[in-house]
Amino acid sequence: MRWDQLAENPTRARDAALFGADAVTTRTFDTPEFRGVTFHEIRAKSIVNRVPGASRMPFEWTVNPYRGCTHACVYCFARKTHSYLDLDTGLGFDSQIVVKVNAPELLRRHLASPRWHGDHIAMGTNVDCYQRAEGRYGLMPGIISALRDHANPFSILTKGTLILRDLDLLRRASEVTEVGISVSVGFTDHELWRTVEPGTPAPERRLDVVRTLTGHGIGCGVLMAPVIPFLSDDPAQLRATVRAIAASGATSVTPLVLHLRPGAREWFMAWLERNHPHLVRRYERLYAEGAYAPKWYQRRITGQVHELAQEYGMGPTRAGLPRRIPAPEPEAPELRAEPTVTQLTLL
């Protein structure tokens, strides 16, 4: 894939350089949160993507308004996608952010097409749609509004606290369609978080998002991902994480063991060599067969987490499972001294 193939009006690149296409506007912002980050704004030609048939994902369609992610998670499987644009999958993935500035209007046009049948759309499954860039570009309100106006079911997976900005929009959308929200919290260890997910909000802040959403009647599950072998998989660590997730009011917890696809694997292993060199050989053995940990290991982690979830009163669920939040039923007219607020409940 070349850069100009993403453009709304593709042009011939002046040379092999990725950013030679006239469709791209490159910006930097001299603010602390964006220092060292370059944004490449493009008017994309499409926004709804079909998931490859061989994918393990439980959904068929996605929307990704951004490429690259300032969360800078060293294990992020989406790093490989930057290589399709001739961008670096390491620091480049963390700091060269592609912004599809016309995403809301493109989505609205797509949803209005007679060829579209209202299938579920998943967001945040490639890079986080509530990463820091969203605070400046504000694409998600327009995207959610389009989905709401067409009563199109959708789900969002995020590590970002910025989703709370769109709380009212999410509530209104949930009155007309299926809405699934999941927050990703793989562990609660602060030392590990600071090194492996340096650009994300702290785990307790993400759990505050879960607490706020559920407090407003929007059921929110937690994707406990990734569980990192030999770093966050100790039984005591798993217990501490599940206990914190349960205390947040999450409706469910779904564990997912770290997987290392090409692009992410090289970056993660370099990080491991610097920070935990004694684990390198163990990882080479554990992931000798490919991107995924052995089935026996995955089953062990899943079993432990599910047992803890049951102990703390939660159940497992599939990632991205949508939940419907019904509108409150109209109350019979009566005289009241003061107005009251009806709490939405989860089906």
Image (cartoon, helix red, strand yellow):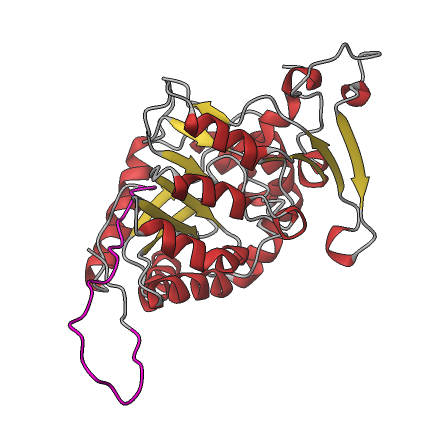
Q: Residue sitting at 25 percent across and 46 percent down?
A: 317
Up the image or down, 113 lies above or below 14; here it is below
Image spot of residue 307 (x, y percent):
21, 54
Return the residue nearer the eye: 117 or 300.
117
Please check the rendered image and state whether residue 44 is part of the magenta-colored stretch, yes or no.
no
Up the image or down, 133 lies above or below 60; here it is below
Up the image or down, 344 lies above or below 129; here it is below
Magenta residue span = 319-341
Q: Quadrant of residue 202?
A: bottom right
Please check the rendered image and state whether residue 330 is part of the magenta-colored stretch, yes or no.
yes
User: In the figure, is residue 180 to the left or right of 272?
Assistant: left
Return the residue nearer the eye: 82 or 198.
82
Image spot of residue 173 (x, y percent):
37, 49
Q: Residue sitting at 31 percent across and 75 percent down?
A: 341
Q: Say whether residue 227 is visible.
A: no
Overall secondary structure of the magenta section: loop
Q: Residue sitting at 46 percent across and 26 percent down?
A: 110
Q: Quadrant of the N terminus?
A: top right
User: In the figure, is residue 266 to the left or right of 30?
Assistant: left
Q: Quadrant of the C terminus?
A: bottom left
Return the residue nearer the eye: 281 or 226.
226
